[in-house]
């Protein structure tokens, strides 16, 4: 089933690419066989823009079979051949950058300026990085570690990778899953979120158009309960990579463990934003607003808990609230829009519930409501600042995933770092100080996979992204991610048989 919905060509220029279905298996689009449909909804208007047939278990089986069939040829290609194909891949995505940007904005509600300047260029940069990394898959040099034996370590691809990506950054998450896997010689089946399949499908089509062989990149768009769990538990899938909530991550790990496959989990976050009393207040307030509101707060590394040393506390609250009130909500495709809607009305109501319950024990300084008028049909929620909540309260401890920042005071440095670490999560954090020793201590003692100093949120392809504690394990991006999609093999030679041969006569004859 294909229903193009109500999106106009200027908002959805690539809609014809989805006419044959929302599955992509063995280099071709296909329709799902579950017998059920799902709609992609523009969260800015509440209107359906694309209706498609969901994948069932048969589609997952077909995609895994295609990936398994493609694996020997792709794994056997030289690193240079894989690299060349991926450089062509980057070029195709760059040529279609506007299609990607508009499709991402449409399905997610992201401001178009964000997808144009961040999501799509970041994805192209990721392809280029892993295209280069494909030529640097190295083991260890040979050496004699045991008597007359020489050993070395080979790095080899793992096989078919089954990945599940979330709805908050569908294009970038597809890239973070697909690129290191295929650069290392694996093949992949990716299940995007049902809400946001469009750019993952465009990404797979671009891979085919760039000359990456059929079956190397496959997409199945179905529910987590049916398609996702079947993919994770599939006996022919050698590795599972999942990004999403900690609760679902536990379920993924449970299923994957039954077949003893490798697991990569990037899970929830509750990033602390620690402002010491010598920090640049203006820079910290601007950083807090940018860090809290990026992608309408639907970012697992978003600044969610600001701990501000008491001498700066009230001034920080006042300045941050003023900056939040200047943020412009609007149509994601309008040039002046700073903040778009949440992904759905369900998510908006979930975020509102956290804030409404917090009114009983904290101060809602600004925001805390959905706008009315022309934005009323969309899933919009105003930037919200909550102050004076207790450390053990729901709004401090739970992942909200919306445009909400909670601010709490602290006194000494020890207390600030202790409070920053006082959640189950450990994905990202930031520390704000002009004292290099103070900042360095924070980077050592805050338990998170990334700690920024005097900034919050930037990421780069060359550096790893991944968490501590309940935020999961494994890294995205960087050479660390690349290595995770490989397995290492110890090779050992017995040198004694070679030593007994008269190699001199073999080479030079009887002279």
Image (cartoon, helix red, strand yellow):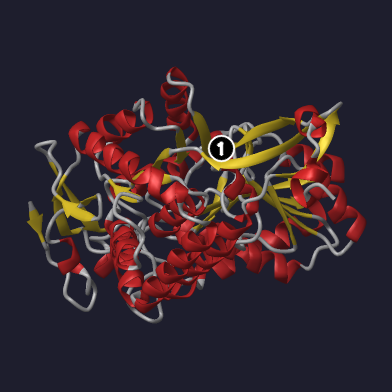
Residue found at x 22% / y 74%? 13
Q: Is residue 49 left or right of residue 67?
A: left
Identity of the residue furthest to the top in this view = 258
Q: Is residue 415 left or right of residue 12?
A: right
Where does the image place residue 257, in percent across and percent down from the top left?
A: 47, 21
| Above-or-below relation of 284 to 395 | below
Residue found at x 51% / y 30%? 262
| Residue on which disc 1 sits | 361
Q: Quadrant of residue 492?
A: top right
Where does the image place residue 137, in percent across and percent down from the top left?
A: 62, 52
| Above-or-below relation of 283 to 481 | below
Residue found at x 84% / y 55%? 439
Q: Is residue 104 left or right of residue 459?
A: left
Identity of the residue furthest to the bottom in this view = 335
Per the image, label 1 sits on a secondary structure element best described as: loop
Residue 352 seen anywhere in this rendered image of the structure: no
How many callouts does the rendering have?
1
Which residue is nearer to you in this view: 197 or 20?
Answer: 20
Q: Is residue 160 left or right of residue 294?
A: left
Residue found at x 33% / y 47%? 192
Which residue is nearer to you in this view: 462 or 370?
Answer: 462
Where does the image place residue 299, in percent across and percent down from the top left?
A: 50, 52
Residue 87 seen anywhere in this rendered image of the structure: yes
Query: How many residues crowd around disc 1 within 10 Å: few (fewer than 14), some, or many (20 or more)?
Result: few
Which residue is nearer to you in this view: 345 or 185?
Answer: 185
Which residue is nearer to you in this view: 96 or 466?
Answer: 96
Q: Quadrant of residue 490?
A: top right
Identity of the residue furthest to the right in this view = 437
């Amino acid at each position: 089933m294909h229903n193009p919905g109500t999106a106009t060509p200027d908002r959805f220029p690539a809609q014809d690419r989805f006419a044959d279905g929302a599955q992509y298996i063995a280099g071709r689009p296909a329709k799902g066989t579950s017998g059920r449909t799902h709609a992609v909804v523009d969260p800015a208007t509440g209107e359906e823009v694309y209706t498609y047939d969901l994948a069932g278990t048969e589609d997952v089986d077909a995609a895994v079979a295609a990936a398994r069939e493609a694996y020997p040829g792709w794994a056997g290609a030289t690193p240079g051949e894989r690299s060349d194909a991926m450089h062509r891949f980057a070029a195709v995505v760059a040529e279609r950058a506007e299609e990607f940007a508009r499709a991402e904005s449409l399905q997610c509600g992201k401001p178009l300026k964000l997808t144009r300047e961040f999501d799509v260029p970041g994805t192209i940069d990721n392809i280029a990085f892993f295209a280069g990394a494909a030529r640097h898959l190295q083991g260890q040099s040979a050496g004699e570690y045991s008597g007359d034996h020489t050993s070395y370590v080979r790095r080899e691809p793992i096989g078919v990778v089954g990945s599940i990506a979330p709805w908050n950054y569908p294009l970038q998450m597809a890239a973070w899953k697909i690129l290191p896997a295929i650069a290392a010689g694996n093949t992949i089946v990716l299940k995007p979120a049902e809400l946001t399949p469009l750019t993952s499908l465009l990404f797979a089509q671009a891979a085919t158009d760039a000359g990456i062989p059929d079956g190397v990149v496959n997409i199945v768009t179905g529910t987590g309960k049916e398609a996702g769990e079947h993919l994770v538990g599939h006996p022919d899938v050698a590795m599972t990579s999942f990004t999403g909530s900690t609760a679902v991550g536990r379920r993924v790990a449970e299923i994957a463990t039954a077949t003893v496959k490798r697991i990569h989990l990037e899970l929830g976050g509750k990033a602390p934003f620690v402002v010491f009393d010598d920090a640049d207040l203006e820079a910290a307030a601007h950083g807090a607003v940018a860090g809290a509101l990026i992608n309408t707060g639907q970012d697992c590394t978003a600044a969610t808990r600001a701990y501000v040393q008491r001498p700066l506390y009230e001034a920080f609250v006042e300045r941050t609230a003023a900056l939040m009130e200047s943020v412009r909500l609007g149509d994601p495709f309008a040039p002046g829009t700073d903040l778009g809607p949440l992904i759905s009305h369900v998510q908006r109501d979930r975020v509102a519930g956290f804030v409404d319950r917090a009114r009983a024990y904290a101060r809602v300084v600004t925001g805390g409501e959905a706008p009315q008028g022309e934005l009323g049909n969309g899933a919009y929620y105003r930037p919200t600042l909550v102050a004076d909540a207790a450390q053990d309260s729901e709004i401090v401890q739970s992942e909200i995933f919306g445009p909400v920042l909670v601010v709490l005071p602290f006194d000494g440095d020890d207390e600030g770092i202790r409070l920053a670490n006082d959640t189950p999560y450990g994905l990202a954090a930031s520390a704000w100080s002009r004292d290099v020793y103070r900042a360095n201590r924070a980077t050592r003692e805050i338990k998170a996979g990334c700690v920024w100093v005097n900034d919050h949120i930037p990421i780069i392809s060359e550096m790893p992204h991944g968490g501590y504690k309940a935020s999961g394990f494994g890294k995205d991006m960087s050479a660390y991610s690349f290595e995770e999609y490989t397995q290492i093999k110890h090779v050992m030679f017995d040198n004694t048989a070679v030593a007994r041969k008269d190699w001199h006569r073999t080479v030079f004859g009887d002279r």
